[in-house]
């Protein structure tokens, strides 16, 4: 059933073609149709050329942007290296300053101990001086008493 339907369809299409092929407008259409395809090909070529030009322009812009980014990256890397050097130098300076501060703190502690020892010696010497002055006063008082007694005896003998 399907085969007979298909064969009748082919026969009908064949008859229509035989009727159409002799008509003038069909002959004109068959001659103009390839020319229309050529025009559409030209249009397609023109569109592809335009697309190619746009892609090339985009490529040039991208290339320029890439070169600019590479230059910026190089500059940034140089700045980074300089900053790392600066940080390293500052760390060294900070370490030296800490070391010097440590030495100064040790020196300060030593000097404070020395001052404390000197203050103790001064206190000891002041106590000794007070004892000596006290003994001196006692001796002077004794001398004065003895001189008075001697003078009294000398007056009593006369």
Image (cartoon, rainbow, N blue to C red):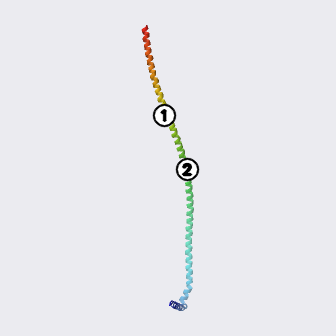
Q: Quadrant of residue 78?
A: bottom right
Q: Is residue 139 above or below residue 83?
A: above
Residue 74, percent across and down? 57, 58
Q: Which mark is residue 116?
A: 1
Q: Nearer the viewer, residue 68 or 136?
A: 136
- Residue at image point 57% right, 60% down: 70
Mark pair 1, 2: CA separation: 41 Å
- Foreground mark, 1 or 2, reads 1
Q: Please report contact status of discs 1 and 2: CB closer than 8 Å, yes or no.
A: no
Dot 2 crowding, Cα within 10 Å, few <14, some 14–19, many 20+: few
Give the number of the disc on residue 152. none
Is 81 or 138 nearer to us in this picture?
138
Dividing the picture into quarters, in which one does residue 75 lie? bottom right
Considering only vertical position in the picture, is 12 above or below 97?
Answer: below
Identity of the residue drawn at 45% across and 19% down: 140
Residue at 50 percent of width and 35 percent of height:
113
Element marked by disc 2: helix
Image: 34 above or below 93: below
User: Are there few (<14), some (14-19), or many (20+) residues within 10 Å of tag 1?
Assistant: few
Name the residue that disc number 2 marks. Answer: 88
In the image, residue 83 lies at what x, y percent?
54, 52
Q: Position of residue 97 (x, y in %)?
A: 53, 44
């Amino acid at each position: 059933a399907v085969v007979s339907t298909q064969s009748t369809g082919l026969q009908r299409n064949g008859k229509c073609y035989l009727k159409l092929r002799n008509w003038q407008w069909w002959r004109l259409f068959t001659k103009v149709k390839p020319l229309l395809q050529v025009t559409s090909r030209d249009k397609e070529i023109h569109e592809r050329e335009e697309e190619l030009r746009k892609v090339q322009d985009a490529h040039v812009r991208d290339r320029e942007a890439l070169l600019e980014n590479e230059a910026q990256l190089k500059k940034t890397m140089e700045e980074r290296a300089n900053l790392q050097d600066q940080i390293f130098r500052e760390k060294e300076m900070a370490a030296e300053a800490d070391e010097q501060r440590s030495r100064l703190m040790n020196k300060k502690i030593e000097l404070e101990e020395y001052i404390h020892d000197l203050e103790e010696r001064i206190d000891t010497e002041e106590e000794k001086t007070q004892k000596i002055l006290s003994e001196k006063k006692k001796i002077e008082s004794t001398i004065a008493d003895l001189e008075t007694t001697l003078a009294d005896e000398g007056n009593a003998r006369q």
